[in-house]
Image (tube, rainbow, N blue to C red):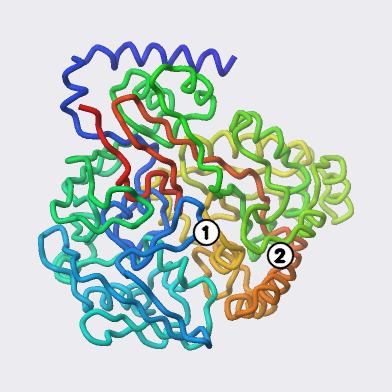
Amino acid sequence: MFRLSTLLLAGAAAATFAAAPAIAQQKAPLSILRVIDADNYDPIRTTATAAAEVMYMLADTLVTVDFDMKTIKPGLAESWTISPDGTTYSFKIRKDVKFCDGRPMTIDDVVYSLKRWTDPANKSPVSFRGGPVKDIRADGDSTLIYELKEPYSDLMFQLALSFASVVDKATVEKLGPNFGVQGFNGTGPYCWSKWTPRQELVLKKNPHYSWGPPIYKDPKPQIDEIVWKIIPETNTLMAAIQAKQADVTYYMPYIALDTMQRIPGMTVQRQENYIYDVFMGFKVDKPVSNDKAIRQAANMATNKEAIAKAIFFGKGQTLPSLLNPAVVDYDKSSADKMPKYDPAGAAKLLDEAGWKPGADGIREKDGQKASFTVYGIRNSDNPRISEAMQADLRKVGIDMKIQLWDATVAWGKLATQEFDAFLMSYPYVTATEAMSLYFRSQQAPTPNRMNWKNPKTDELLKAASMATDADKRKQVLAEVQTQLTEANVWVPLVSQPLWVVATDRVEGARAHGLYGAGLYKGLDLKLKR
């Protein structure tokens, strides 16, 4: 019934969109549709994938990542060397790069940007990704020295992420806290033109750009103007693509993918190497959610398979463990330790832990109701995921209250202590990256929103980060995966896929997906004449 009603609504909306003159389709800029906006576009001040997907077009990084999501390729750095002890990285920087305003990029710009990212004084929520920095400095006019206090096995991948983008110091200082809100000046293939929050972000082609990474056939941007449009309602988004009043999206509702594949001229492709997982995390120091029995029962009571089928329509995969099986250094044995779906077992566990059903069916213990509040971003999936979990938990006597927020304010809300649990989705490639991001003590209160502060976890993650031997790293990561799985800090849910859908007005679109950025730098995108 949902499938039929959704497609009928889409058809009606498509008829409305189709009323526009065909000539307008030819003269319009490339329009990319998405369902949420970012809170800002300063690379060091946001963890939002909605920011990263635009940032890769606005700015460049030292290195880039190939479509396999594993191979590091040149970016602003033409080449690099790493010292035998793994602490000193030397990058040869290109000399032909210019900012959007036409000023040549210098080695000083690179040093400034990376120090701005990693300097604790700037309180960036992603500064840890730069590793234990000892010094970042120039050696001459084209060599960057990135020196660490100790080895950091994830550094090259982290240097490819949007947080390490090179930006213009003058623009940062001119705009202050409004950098990435009122303007931006980077070296990317596209330049900031205008941002209307929750509506659209307009980019213009960087006329100087000719240094795109080698993963693209052409190092220059092929499109004059790109408009990132926000359409929160997925039926309307789907209709706009069907009516060809928009050009490309990777936020297509999963219910529509099979239909899109049958439309002549429509390109629908999946990024097979993509990892973007959905989970619910608990604050382990709040009443109710601090009880391991509640957390374990939530894992056992949640019908993850039903959520995957109902919300992702067979396109997503149920997570069998804390991390995705495709991730580097995944420990298979951790899946055996993850509680299986067993509502009856969950109820028994709660009984044994002293949580007894009250008159209203909600369990109580020592005068405390088995009730907690979950926060999350209001997007196309989270309302249905949270409501399905709410119903499942209610059946075993746990009351889960839901509060979802628009993305422009959600990140601020998720940095508070107001909630007991949170719903989140995130991209990653290595186990070290995923667990260091969320579980190190120093990451609290965000992105370690669980307030998980455990010396053993910190010790293991430090050992993994410093390991220069792959087998040793995998061994300690297996231990920390076991520890966190047994603590039931998370309820792992689904790994959502990345599908890029493009109309026949677009040529060359290829799904990438680094940190959720389906189009990455977009240098393969062209518009048919």
Q: How far across and how far down the image is residue 383, in percent?
A: 53, 36
Quarter of the image with the C terminus is: top left
Position of 221 with respect to 500 (left or right) is left
101 with respect to 505 (left or right) = left
Q: Residues within 10 Å of mark 1 (few under 14, many from 20)?
A: some
Question: Can you say whether 315 is above or below 460 in the image?
Answer: above
Count of numbered labels shown in the rendering: 2
Q: Amino acid at mark 1?
A: Lys
The crowding category of the residue bearing disc 2, from other C-alpha atoms within 10 Å (few below 14, some 14 to 19, many at least 20), is: many
In the current view of this chain or complex, which residue is farthest to the front? Answer: 217
Q: Is residue 110 left or right of residue 254?
A: left
Query: Quick one: 258 or 376, which is closer to the camera?
Result: 258
Which one is in front in this view, the residue at disc 1 or the one at disc 2? 1
Q: Residue at x 51, y 83 (%)?
A: 86
Residue closest to the eye, 62 or 454: 62
CA gap between label 1 and label 2 equals 21 Å
**503 or 481, which lies in front?**
503
Q: Which residue is mark 2?
A: 481
Residue 1 lies, in percent from the top left, at: 59, 14
Residue at 81% across / 57% down in the picture? 337
Residue displayed at 66% across by 64% down: 329
Residue depicted at x 49% and y 60%? 71
Which element is circle 2 on? helix
- Residue receiving disc 1: 70
Circle 1/circle 2 CB separation < 8 Å: no
Give the side of residue 529 with respect to residue 410, left or right: left
Q: Which element type, helix, strand or loop, lies under badge 1?
A: loop
* Residue 390 rendering spot, x and y as whole percentages: 65, 38
Q: Quadrant of residue 19?
A: top left
The residue type indicated by label 2 comes to: Gln
